[in-house]
Amino acid sequence: ATVTIQVDPDDPTRIVEIPADWGALQHTNQPYYLPAVPTVLADRMFSLIRDPDAWWVGQMVAYLMRPSEMVRQVLSESETNIDFSYPVVGVHVRRGDKRGENGIEFLSLEVYMEQVELWFTQYEMYHPPTERRIYLASDEPQILEECHEKYPQYTIYDNLNISIEATGYTEASRIGILHDVHMLSLTDYVVCTMSSNIGCLAYELLHFKHGDASGMVHSLDTPWWFVYRHNMMYESVVENTALNLRKGDKLEIENIQASLETKYKYKKTDTQTQTVETKNLRTEEISDYPVYMVKKVPALFNFSIFDSIV
């Protein structure tokens, strides 16, 4: 199922607007907003990509993040220090600018590394034994030191200067973020938290580089999301009397940003069953539904600029 939204064919706008006031963005009534998948591309995207919204945003992100010559030299120099012909797992541990936020509990480094080791173990089921190598990015320098101390059996690629500069608002910190996102997007698998924009950017760029990258990232908290997306629709695929759920019920999450800030609407229960908290538009009830009971309903937009694409 999809929801198709008509776009004014006489609208000549070809500019992507990034307002300075992010708070105002979540209250705007723009007729279309990202991901805004074009109708004409939908069938091909849905047949090839398991997370088409992330793939589509990834194409735009990759275009917007084309490096300048100076940044390209920095990235190229770093790439030469890592042999990507052998497996490398990317790890992003966010700390610095999350300190002081209400309800935030940091995950230990061990939680990240458990997923890293699991990936290598699964990889070796079909490949010869391989050296454990990770690219570690963090805005907390102590995380780099801790990882070297606790995991001497791993080859760890990192950049202490980037970690030290990460929480500042300087040119060096901005280049450092570009560097880490780029390096994470070159790895074979990424362990991160997608409540961080860095994790989301890496996921989007992996889609740009690999096509379907939905299995290349493990988020330890939320799924991929797009900041200030107004809503997200799901549809139930089963009937469940206990949850007052009928097959085909439309389920909605409103204000994705606010949802993430109030303990995440997409979460794991004590039994490790991943659930999504939504409003059932038929019953008006708000409930947690296991993700295997629902499927995402993409929002499609009839942009006339794509009409010439067959």
Image: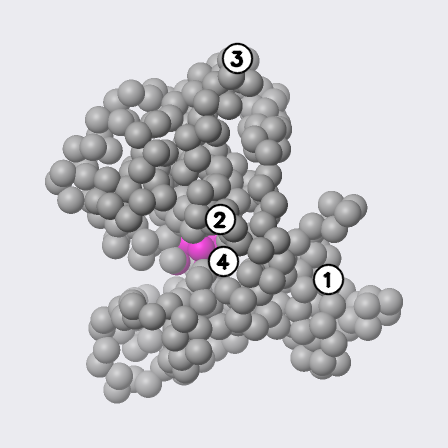
Q: Earlier in the sequence, mark 2 or mark 1?
A: 2
The three-letter amino acid code for the residue at tag 4 is Trp
As measured in the structure, the alpha-carbon distance from the residue carrying label 1 to the one carrying label 4 is: 18 Å
| Residue that mark 2 sits on | 98
Rendered location of residue 189, percent (x, y): 48, 34
Circle 4 residue: 225
Q: Could you give the CA–CA distance between mark 2 and mark 3, rounded to whole angstroms?
A: 30 Å
Residue 240 sits in quarter = bottom right
- Magenta region: 49-56
Q: Quadrant of residue 265?
A: bottom right
Kind of residue at disc 2: Lys
Decide which of tag 2 and tag 3 comes sooner along the chain.
Answer: 2
> Disc 1 versus disc 3: distance between alpha carbons?
41 Å
In terms of sequence position, does the residue under pointer 4 or pointer 3 come before the other? 3
Q: Secondary structure at mark 4?
A: loop
Q: Amino acid at mark 1?
A: Tyr
**Kind of residue at badge 3:** Gln
Residue 298 seen anywhere in this rendered image of the structure:
yes
Question: In the drawing, what numbered circle is on residue 153?
Answer: 3
